[in-house]
Amino acid sequence: MSIVDKIRTAAFDAIAALYQYEGATTNILINATKPEFEGDYTVVLFALTKPLRKSPDVLGKELGDQLLQDHPTLFTSYNVIKGFLNLVINQAYWVSFLEAHNATTQFGKQPATGSKVMVEYSSPNTNKPLHLGHLRNNFLGWSIAEILHANGNEVIKSCIVNDRGIHICKSMIAWQMFGNGDTPERAGTKGDHFVGDYYVKFNDEYKRQVEELVQSGIAKELAEKEAPIMKATQEMLQQWEQGDPDVMELWTRMNSWVYAGFDVTYKRIGSDFDKVYYESQTYLLGKDIVEKGLETGILYKKNDGSVWIDLTADGLDEKLVLRKDGTSVYITQDLGLAQQKYEQFGAEESIYVVGDEQNYHMKVLKLILQKFGAPYANGIHHLSYGMVELPTGKMKSREGTVVDADDILDEMITVARGKTEELGKVKDFNPEELSELYNVLGLSALKFFLLRVDPKKKMVFNPEESIDFHGFTGPFVQYTHARIKSVLRKIEEGQGTIQTNPVFGDGQDTLLPLEKQVISQLEQFPVVVREAGSELDPSKIAIYVFNLAKGFNAFYTEHSIANAETPGKKALRLKIASLTASVIAYGMHLLGISVPERM
RNA sequence: GGUCUGGUAGCUCAGUUGGAUAGAGCAACAGCCUUCUAAGCUGUGGGUCAUUGGUUCGAAUCCAAUCCGGAUCACCA
């Protein structure tokens, strides 16, 4: 149990004993004490003054006395200022916390709960390479899966590949027109970029044709429909749906190029999946659900044969679930896929990492499944994340203002190399070690940057300012870890083993403020892991791990570990250092970032 | 237009779900390496928390209105 929970429980018991009042659970607010006051944690009394009919001063005094009397090992003193009861925690608590956990490698990880959660993320289109927005999605998805795992859940990571549809056909048509049988191998281009280039070519040609038609006096709207390249694309989509062998062959071939390219990028960024679904295999799903919905009257058929659901009573609109020609729309297959996932994995919770542009769609999906009474409906959660924008505005693939994933990764790694060479701390590394280090640092800078902000909010990515290795960044946190490891290594080399005795706290020593601060930060980690899980928010971890690193660095520059004043102090600081290192390592792992031993 | 969502330091973001004098990083300025990694530490300056009103012991946080952004409302995905 965390110290905050302990204090809350103690306060509840004390209030019950003093005033025979048991309605206090939700009224007890515990905060960290502001630095300008004496104390570690503070009970805010205002909410209790009314039901207990006590003035803040009297209540504070009575509650403080009672807490001290009930828990002499937990509290040593208190003071009351205005309506705030500031409690000083017994240093023995901090010391014994450190003794209990300093050897724990995954401190903060919760025991298995038996619950199963599915996390769907990434969901790329196979007509163009990944960009910065996809990276946010991938990093969020991987991290939230890891965070849910740390909270005791069994997690299944899944991905739905949008491998069919009009967008793919655009690349295919353009390749037929302009490709001359070229391949990624021959062109020396990564497969996903190769296919993406034809997607761009399509749009260029399409624009040209529309322009031409408009020049010849045709209205723009009509021209957009009638452009030959667009008509050819739509025809190709129909041929695909009919299983035309030539079209299928081309489709398979071009997708395989894209997958080869994606594989490289996914490997670089560390994305992986337990189950990959392909839209080409799921796009017909969901029709049986529609059928059932018609029977039960949840859905209704209009005169033209199209099928709808009326969600106006829930504040939404009427929503089409099946076209008049009987073919599926997006929501149809999503209904089907949700059902299939549940049949295959039986997860009671399902997280969809999907951009906030689809908030409405996700709301509708959940609502429809709830109306069907699907057992997994209430467990659907949309981890909605905001778009990544540039200082110049939104990224538009049409206008060529997207930040390509591979490019930005390369750039990050190049900067990491430059910084590392400049500092010259790892001159004895061999080329493999160096390249590994550059990767770890560059990736960290990017991942941390994208994960440190609230997922729900849109964010601005400034390519020049974002490649920073100082301050609130991944490399800063990694640096703190490497620093600790260096100290531990040196002490180990000096004396053979890490000496952790004698035990600190025999009554002689006093915890210094910076020592206590780091320990209390460490103590909060499990609560942060829990919050990050329940709120589906990795930024909580990033912020925490940064503050921990900052707190440790302040302690580090002020107090020597190796040459501590007493053997007891040295043992204590070693434990602070090693637990900090392992919490940083585990916290960063939850973000998908690894931490080097040296840098 | 309907619905949803956002507006906090020059820039990028926190703000523990209503608590004490609103915090970080970057940028600017001033200090700190013969001692465990200076990718670090310490300090200074920088705010009408979009605006107005309301709710109460107390509001950046809750409510209402207004201003300014964004998303969405397709027989697209």
Image (tube, rainbow, N blue to C red):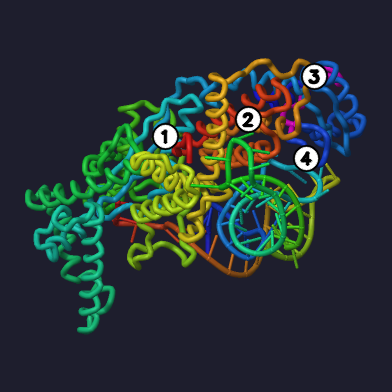
The answer to whether one can see residue A166 in this image is no
> Which chain is indicated by disc 3?
A
- Where on the picture, by quarter, is residue B28? bottom right
Could you tell me how far apart the alpha carbons at marks 2 and 1 are, in whole angstroms? Answer: 31 Å
Q: Is residue A582 above or below residue A20?
A: below
Q: Amino acid at mark 4?
A: Lys
- Who comes first in sequence, dot 1 or dot 3? 1
Q: Amino acid at mark 3?
A: Gln
Q: Is residue A228 magenta?
A: no
Q: Secondary structure at mark 3?
A: loop
The residue at 23%/75% (across/down) is: A208
In magenta, the rendered stretch is: A13-30
Could you tell me how far apart the alpha carbons at marks 2 and 3 are, in whole angstroms? Answer: 24 Å
Could you tell me how far apart the alpha carbons at marks 4 and 1 are, in whole angstroms? Answer: 39 Å
- Who comes first in sequence, dot 2 or dot 1? 1
Location of mark 2 (residue): A522
Disc 4 crowd, CA 10 A, few/some/many (<14, 14-19, 20+)? few
Do pointers 2 and 3 mark residues of a single chain? yes
Q: Nearer the viewer, residue A99 or A21?
A: A99
Do pointers 2 and 1 mark residues of a single chain? yes
Location of mark 4 (residue): A34
Location of mark 1 (residue): A350
Do pointers 4 and 1 mark residues of a single chain? yes
Outermost residue on the left side: it is A245
- Who comes first in sequence, dot 2 or dot 4? 4
Q: Secondary structure at mark 2?
A: helix
* Contact, mark 1 vs mark 3 (Cβ under 8 Å): no
Disc 1 crowd, CA 10 A, few/some/many (<14, 14-19, 20+)? many
Q: Nearer the viewer, residue A253 or A218?
A: A253
Q: Secondary structure at mark 1?
A: strand
Depth check, mark 2 against mark 3: the one in front is: 3
* Contact, mark 2 vs mark 1 (Cβ under 8 Å): no
